[in-house]
Amino acid sequence: MRRVSRLTVFFAGELGLAALLTAAALHEPGPTSERDRYRVATTAPSVDLRQVTDAVSAVNFDFRGIDTLGEEFILFVSVSGVLVLLREPEAEERGLIIDAADAGRDMKPTSAMRGWMVGTVGPKVLFGLYIVGHGALSPGGGFQGGVILATAPMIIYLADGFKVFRRIVKFRMVEIAEAAGATAFLVLGLLGILAGREYLTNVLPLGEANTASSGGTVVAISWATGIEVCAGFVLVMYAFLQHVLAKREAAE
């Protein structure tokens, strides 16, 4: 297909998409619409019933926590599938250590760039912990904070290569952390049954709104989710890096 034909098809699709989005925006209901009842039913109760000022976290980890549990185990199963498909047993048995700076990249980072990247690891971890721990107060929570925490090992890989990444990221410990995070979510749900109520019922002390201890099980589930998400993404990065670099070294 010629360049002109490709551009014609592309812009035709873009115009069609723009027309659909415009039509949807014009028919968007206002804040007093009957379709806005879901917002009304969740925003005020988040504070009144759960002492949680971030309604999204209240919905994710409390009002419809069973859906979030399913989403977390979708991630858990997906990570497990990646590990099964990309695991390199021969590389593990031979103790294969690959320096990604030599095997996978044309240029090493400069000293200034390396210093900058390494210097951002600490703030990145602190910010990720803040997002996980304050999900009941402000936008954030376990999913977002877990992804932020997972970028810290990737920065280490970019700065120092796979040798340092592998030495810092203990594969078995990260596997245990992922399983522990998923298990903690399940166990927190059982607290409701032990209290004689429904599964995942919020039975822990709710605390006071606008404090880090507010929300009861919302905060606890946020931490469990953050651990599972962070560990899951790190395991996927580890598996892909080892697989690609091992194949590259074998080809050489």
Image: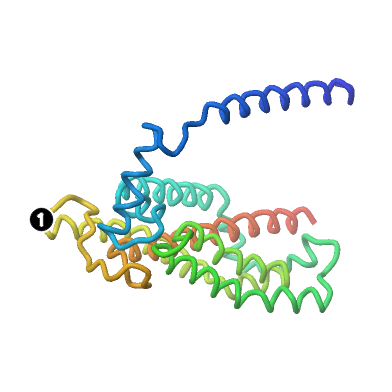
Please tell me which residue is depicted at 38% across the width and 61% down the height of the picture: 53
Please determine whether, in this image, residue 156 is positioned above or below residue 225: below
**Residue lying farthest front?**
32
Q: Position of residue 245 (x, y in %)?
A: 70, 58
List the residue tagged with mark 1: 196
| Quarter in which the C terminus is drawn | bottom right
Residue 114 location in percent, x, y?
A: 76, 75
**Nearer-the-camera pick, 126 or 151:** 126
Q: Nearer the viewer, residue 144 or 43?
A: 43
In which quarter of the view is residue 246 placed?
A: bottom right
Quarter occupied by the N terminus: top right
Q: Residue at x 60, y 78 (%)?
A: 122
Amino acid residing under circle 1 = Gly
Picture layout, residue 120 above or below residue 39: below
The residue sitting at 60% across, 64% down in the picture is 151
Q: Up-down: is 249 above or below 66? A: below
Residue 69 % position (x, y) = 35, 50
- Residue nearest the observer in this picture, 229 or 56: 56
Q: Position of residue 49 (x, y in %)?
A: 25, 57
Left/right placement of residue 113 relative to residue 4 reads left
